Amino acid sequence: MADRVLRAAFVEGARFAPLYDHLPEFTEAAGRLVDVAYREPLPALLDRLLGPAPASAADDPSARPTDSGASPVGSPDVAPLHLTSAHSRYTADLASHMLPLDDLLGPEFLTAFDPEALEWCRWEGRLVQVPRSVETRLLYYRTDILEDRREREWFCEASGGADLRVPATWDELAVVAQHFTRRGRTHGFTFPGADAGLVALFAEILVSVGGTFLDPDGTPRWATRAGEWVVTLLRDLFRRWEAVPPEMPRQTEEDVSHLFRMGLASLCCDYPDTARLLRDPTFSAVAGWHSVALYPTGPEGARAVWTGAPTFAIPAGCPDPDGAAELLRFLLSTENQLAEAKQGALPSRLDAREAARDALRLGTIGELRFRLAEQTLREAALVPPRFPGYRHTEERLRQALLRAVLGEQDPAAALTQAAAGE
């Protein structure tokens, strides 16, 4: 029976877990068991696939204990995987480690997918991943306080007559975040420091205020006055105004979602597929008391939103590519894509996306969330360029940003050092 077992490595997290509950259906239909060898956050999973990130974390305050004795998948002492989760941001880094999928999966299957999302998963013409969904982000806010009459009066008094509203610009977000920061009770805003979510937020604000994140070839362009302004804003939110929780350096995107869900933050930037837990009062203190809006803009009205795709890929050492392809097709079937859409995800299959859109009821938060996510994809998608070494660049910048936000290094020096590869 061992040769009938498919070994998989899946990304962990509240946004992703429900799909794995469908694996027994695959076993029943295909007669193949699925051994989930690893379920880990994406950074840990990438360490297994590619080895540890090259950037040093020796002085990184966000560093968490890891399984430092784990060998990368593909090493002689590690049983080979058939399927793995990954992400479109790392397509170029993963390309030499994954099987090409065009012929293995065939055009009949692949033409069902968003062609732009498929393009994010190609390197040098070869498809090396398949998008599981399309990620973009929205601004989440608590309606119970933002629409409260007393809060509006207090804000008007404190701001010299300004109206309290959902922040339309990043400057407005800073003001509203300060207003809703109540020491010991709640914070006005929250963002992660321990994963790539910090880089995403920096890049979003940078581009919206007229800066450039990376050239198409991967050359850093963030060490500018615009970049310094963004880092200073994030530093002020954290240190000067204390509008961001003190745990920020150790927080991941999952932690940010949890904080907002528990009512401990008034605003946050998050993905649409956090909806499953947000709307469930068993897990959420703000179920029925939150809404979503388009991202804030820069001063000239420009909006930029981090966009990409969680993916599935087949490692180059896979002992049964056809079996792995069968599992991948099952996980990304129309039925499973629709099931993920019910949790808030934006399907990567166009047939599933259309069906999910048609099933939404007008006037509901689900319809609003879906509509704004599609609008963001059309008008404000910020997709980082694909190039070998992107993962190294991302981690190097994250550490530099964290040092600057914590006040350990001047913003200009931190950005210049990261751009120079130090």
Image (spheres, helix red, strand yellow):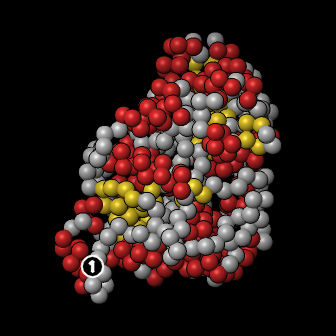
Q: Amino acid at mark 1?
A: Phe
Q: Residue at x 69, y 42 (%)?
A: 119
Q: Nearer the viewer, residue 51 or 344?
A: 344
**Residue at position x 54%, y 52% from top?**
378
Out of 149 and 56, give the one closest to the viewer.
Answer: 149
Locate residue 226: give its quadrant: bottom right
Q: Residue 110 lies in what quarter of the image?
A: top right
* Residue 136 in the figure: left or right of residue 140: right
Q: Residue at 52% across / 74% down in the picture?
A: 300
**As displayed, is residue 244 above or below residue 280?**
below
Q: Quadrant of the N terminus?
A: top right
- Residue 396 appears in the picture as rendered: yes
Left-right relation of 103 to 136? right
Instruction: Tally the marks.
Output: 1
Tell me residue 71's x, y (percent): 73, 41
Say which of 77 and 127 sits in front: 127
Q: What x and y, as percent, mark residue 403?
A: 61, 74
The residue at the point 41 percent across, 69 percent down is 168
How far from the left and from the top, in percent, is residue 235? 52, 77
Q: Work out whether 210 lies above or below 97.
A: below
Residue 46 visible, this orientation: no
Residue that sits furthest to the left in the current view: 150
**Image spot of residue 210 (x, y percent):** 61, 73
**Left or right of residue 100, residue 310 in this image:** left
Query: SS class of the residue under badge 1?
Result: helix
Q: Which residue is mark 1?
A: 155
In terms of depth relative to the viewer, which is nearer, 251 or 142? 142
